[in-house]
Amino acid sequence: MVTPEVRTFGPRVTEGSADAGTVAWTRAQMSAFLGARLDPEHLARAGAAFEGNRLRGAYVDPDPTPVATLRSWDAELTVPGGTVRADVITGIGVRSTHRRRGLTDRLLTEDLGAAARAGAAAAVLTSTQGALYERWGFGLATRTRPLTVDTARARFRDPVVRGSLEIVERPDAALALARPIHERARRRHPGALERLASQWDSVVVGAGPWNGFEVDRQRHVVIWRDDDGRPAGYVVHRVEESWYATGAATLGVVDLQALTPSAYLELWRHLCSQDLVGTVRWSGASTDEPLSWLLTDPRAAVSGEDDAMLWLRVLDVPGLLAARRYPAEDALVVEVDDPLGHARGRWRLDTHDRVAPAVTAASGEPDVVLPATSLGSVVLGGVDPRLLVRAGRLDERSAGAAGRLARMLAPPTVPWNGTRF
Ligand SMILES: CC(=O)SCCNC(=O)CCNC(=O)[C@H](O)C(C)(C)COP(=O)(O)OP(=O)(O)OC[C@H]1O[C@@H](n2cnc3c(N)ncnc32)[C@H](O)[C@@H]1OP(=O)(O)O
């Protein structure tokens, strides 16, 4: 059997058409995900949407179409108290005739190696399958928890309406207002990512390669301004089940970002007070939404089952640990086991200086020993190290070390990534 050759390149689009390599790569990736068959115009749009990304493919010559694909790019990832550069990975797809031959392993191992050499502190992905990515050192770091509101029961405790709302019809105008809000909001949530222009397209107009760039005309963007007229929150929503049969539609929240408690309250008041709406549902909500605390009847807002969102793979342990801030002053020696090598080692994490935590190579006995997957899960603060001790996934070598680590890693807000990719 011929061993496929791995090639990496950037997409090229000139005068409205994508080059042959970009077209073949995009077609292969769409087909691995059972996606839409794109015509040349849309292939060029897909290529343009991938601008600045790394396209990796495994090729069996002379076939110009790769049998396996992977796409990645650099983006800022929020960590508690700061940001790091992360390698964002998506589009891993293998032709059905070439599965289970180690092609994902090759593409992913190469991508992680290149990202580590280029100085990325971590790699992140969202996954179609939960059992897949731990073998490459990814740990589940953030979750979402769907929120469903019965609008007939939702009465807000605070009757005073603040600020003003604007329904922005034009997508470019909506984007110009929403983007700066998101840029500030994402820095408050460990696990949040900077968005590519193409990701904004999919949020605001609902168009992307997966649906043949079909515009979702059900989407509406509402901006909230404070009493001084400053934009401080927005919601993108769409009707999921029409009011036509029942007189009570289900409104889906696509994205909601609020910079202040008032922005959050007023956006939800708006969502829940519309005529012809019986239910509001946000599948991508955080696991600590304050909504039910704003209502006279907390049970008007019901939370569903958690879903896995962001998987994180640490590539640079000292870089990542030194970039975040810690609410507790302490010092621990942490040993990380990593078959791929990127995170392997023993470090002393000293957080006595709250502004400049020290991470140094250590030779003494470790207080905790954990695999790279567990480090990926705890490093943003979304998973308590004591839970992983109970699950046999973190070894506490000195008494109470997992609790001390939990206090050091506690995040300012629960990690949340509201952008699936
Ligand atoms: C970040 C993202 O892009 S998520 C999207 C993932 N892609 C998809 O779901 C599209 C459809 N599926 C596919 O294209 C492929 O089946 C993939 C990408 C899931 C796997 O690709 P393959 O090339 O077959 O994987 P590869 O042969 O490298 O297998 C590597 C390891 O993962 C294991 N593995 C492969 N698929 C799965 C799976 N679905 N669930 C659990 N383990 C799996 C293999 O058994 C192998 O394990 P081993 O190292 O212990 O032997």
Image (cartoon, rainbow, N blue to C red):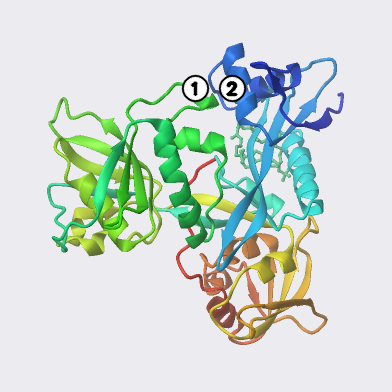
In the foreground, 346 or 21: 21
The quarter in which the C terminus is drawn is top right
Q: Earlier in the sequence, mark 1 or mark 2?
A: 2
Position above or below: 178 against 338 = above
Please name the amino acid that badge 1 sits on.
Phe
Please report contact status of discs 1 and 2: CB closer than 8 Å, yes or no: yes
Left or right relative to 194: residue 28 = right
Left or right relative to 403: residue 255 = left
Residue 195 rendering spot, x and y as whole percentages: 55, 44
In the foreground, 232 or 123: 232
Point out which mark residue 8 bears. Answer: none
Identify the residue under disc 2. Answer: 45
User: For residue 95, what is the image quadrant?
Assistant: top right
Circle 1 sits in a helix, a strand or a loop, which is it? loop
Whether residue 418 is visible, yes or no, is: no
The quarter in which the N terminus is drawn is top right
Point out which mark residue 213 bears. Answer: 1
Count of numbered tags = 2
